[in-house]
Image (cartoon, rainbow, N blue to C red):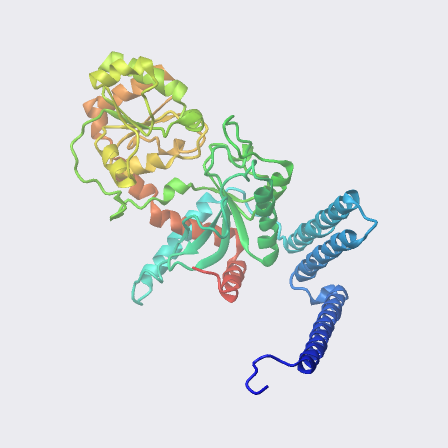
Amino acid sequence: MKGNKFLSRENSTTWRAWRKTTIRVFVGLNLLIIVGFYVATSSFHGGLSHMDESSSHISGTDAHRHGRMLGAQEGKQQQLLTLADPNGDARAIVSGASQAEAHLKELHQPQDVRADKAVVAEQTRFYTGPLDVDEATMKLAMVINQTYWDDPSEKTWWNKPGYHLSYMEDYPPYPYQRIKSEDGKDTGVVALIAPFYDLTYYRAEMARAMFWRMKANGQVVIGISSYQEFPGQITNPFDDRHTTEADWEIYLATDGWLHCFREPEKWIPPGVPRILLSESDFHNPERRDDGGSLQPWGLEKLYDVAYSNQGGEWNDWARNWTLAKPSFIQLIAETNATVLILGRDLTKEADLQPLVASGNIVSHEKALWRDFLKLIEQSRSLVTFNVHDASPRVLAEAMCMDVPVLINWHILGGWKYATEQTGEDFVDTASFIQAYKRLQEPERKARLRPRQWYRENSGYYRASLQLQAFLHIVMGDEKMRSAKQLMTDRHAEP
């Protein structure tokens, strides 16, 4: 019938036949594509498996990376085949996965580290000079500084000499810090500043492997003692970073060490050149910006002695609260002093509440750095009871603010700041109170010039020149140039 919208029986049969043929063709084409992809993939991996190690980059690095790809692929195929096996069971699946995982861990990952260690061993140039290079470093630092000022070219921030520690960054991650020149560019030098993390196995292992990879690549890696006893064993019972035998092997392979110790031979790996230079030496006494000022504001003095402790078990151990607390109680009893405690919650210290109520103890639990510095300036002195501490920065900050310091003689680092011009040291509660009283004597006060001393003997510019001089002494100019060029070639971020 004309105008009938429905197909006749003959047309309907023809349509069904055509549709079946189309589906078969479509399925066949997809099967051909899948088979072709599988063959191409197999050929690709076969090609990788026959790569010669000579085509890899550094000590077989790329070849081992390809090995990891193959191992993962083999493990995946093994699991898939087991799942497809009608006679397989759950135990077979678990076995296949475990074997693949063991294959990866035992064969590929250790080979990477072993290869890097072998390259480091081949490249190692044994240092034969004196271990303590403080005097030579200072002489070269003065030459670098004089050369800069004698140069008739324009003096700008990007051609100023000196190296400094960069801010904490994601790459490389803590406990590494990059060292940069004054123009903000990477020098190719990385500092290891703390032990590796105990609680996260993979993070610690990656950080250890990163050391050998950076060294094998040609970078310079130095150690800096800025974390309790590091590189010695950490004794803080509340800490989660400690030194293992594998770590000591790493410390021995460093190119140099900035330390804070009275007796460095007891702490620094033997044979590694060293210099008495701490992170606290890098404070800039001329800094004044929105973040804070290390130049005094001329604020009124409100407190007799300040003490910084952020609270918690870790800080109480590191800041020696067990000595600080009874010392303050005794000091107030004898002198009626006003003590400023920064950072610590005192609400649970029942025996201190009467002193808080009387105003003899003033507590500031939290403060921005710029406000923290103002509180320090408003104090007549600052005390550190710390023993297991590597040169606390608060000592440098206090001196920059022209505040005298009282330092526990037993402190690991920062002992060098106790001088005739900066303050006093002590060993216990009784000697602390005596040292505090001496600072109140008019004749002793007249000799105190903590800010002047810090500017003349420490501070950012001087320390940055020392760091640059130290690295060039122990590594040589050629090695320093090649390390920096390595970063330039790899387009390292400034």
Q: Locate residue 36: give its quadrant.
A: bottom right
Q: Residue 28 or 342: which is nearer the viewer?
A: 28
Q: Which of the image's four quarters has the N terminus?
A: bottom right
Residue 271, above or below 75: above
Q: Nearer the viewer, residue 93 or 86?
A: 86
Q: Position of residue 231 (x, y in %)?
A: 54, 37
Determine if residue 226 is in view: yes
- 362 shown above or below 490: above
Viewer-side residue, 103 vs 221: 103
For the point 67% across and 53% down, the residue is 112
Residue 61 locus on image (x, y percent): 66, 59
Q: Is residue 76 left or right of residue 478?
A: right
**Left or right: where does residue 404 sit relative to residue 97?**
left
Q: Residue at x 30, y 63 (%)?
A: 155
Q: Residue 483, how many percent across, how many down?
A: 53, 59
Report whether 177 appears left or right of 153.
right
Identify which residue, 239 or 12, lies in the foreground: 12
Q: Residue furthest bottom?
A: 2
Residue 280: % across, % down:
38, 40
| Residue 328 vertical position relative to residue 20 in the rendered view, above or below | above
Residue 410 seen in this snapshot: no
